[in-house]
Image: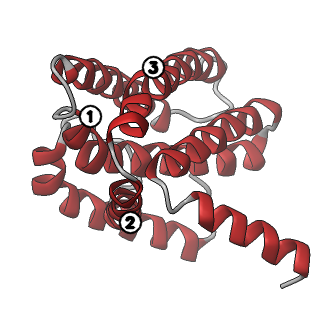
Amino acid sequence: MAQTDQTAHDAGNARDDDVVALLMRQHGDIRNLFDEVERTSGDERREAFRSLVRLLAVHETAEQEVVHPYAGRLFDGAKDMVADRLAEEKAAKEMLAELDGMDPEDPGFMPRLRELRTDVQRHARAEERYEFLQLRRRADPEKLASMAKAVRAAESMAPTRPHPGVQGAAANMAAGPVAALMDRTRDAVRKAMGKKG
């Protein structure tokens, strides 16, 4: 690895040792993937959309398993804040599942994708302004680091596609492993067969 690549890699790992920094970086990655889906076409768009679906699915699962349960106990009214984020995530999963069943070249795909993008960005801003801010204020650095490790572990086992019926920490723990196994098997078969999407 080149020195500049190693430096960037080390900086990325240092930022990922804090759950808020990790999730904020992922929010940026999600925005970039939306850009890529919008500016490409054909197989490139399909591949970019598949990456977007995967990142959104694992990101939201990890937040539901690790971040929201902790944040919901931080202060009076925190449960309402988390309930709002969960409702937004459920709506996004439903729209993402609908889009996942469409051909990205379908004329109705891009308008729906732009609607999803607006909703996802609104949701991310709310997390950053309220939930993440409270995590920064109320959790010590060791807790933020342990949560980052827990998020990465949850992401490594999370479903790679949206499952709107699986919502919240308990549901993810119960149904998530089966959904993840099915999704990851499907991903491996598609990759082995050279299929996109």
Q: Position of residue 46 (x, y in %)?
A: 66, 46
The residue singled out by tag 3 in the image is 126
Q: Position of residue 11 (x, y in %)?
A: 71, 64
Q: Crowdedness of circle 3 by 10 Å Cα count: few (<14), some, many (20+)?
A: some
- Asked if 70 appears above or below 154 in the picture, the reply is above
Q: Position of residue 41 (x, y in %)?
A: 79, 38
Q: Earlier in the sequence, mark 2 or mark 1?
A: 2
Instruction: Find residue 154 and report its image quarter.
Output: bottom left
Q: Position of residue 92 (x, y in %)?
A: 40, 26
Q: Nearer the viewer, mark 1 or mark 3?
A: 3
Instruction: Find residue 185 and report its image quarter.
Output: bottom left
The residue singled out by tag 2 in the image is 149
Instruction: Find residue 93 and report its image quarter.
Output: top left
Look at the numbered disc 2 and give the secondary structure of its residue: helix
The amino acid beneath tag 2 is Lys
Look at the numbered disc 1 and give the secondary structure of its residue: loop
Q: Nearer the viewer, mark 2 or mark 1?
A: 2
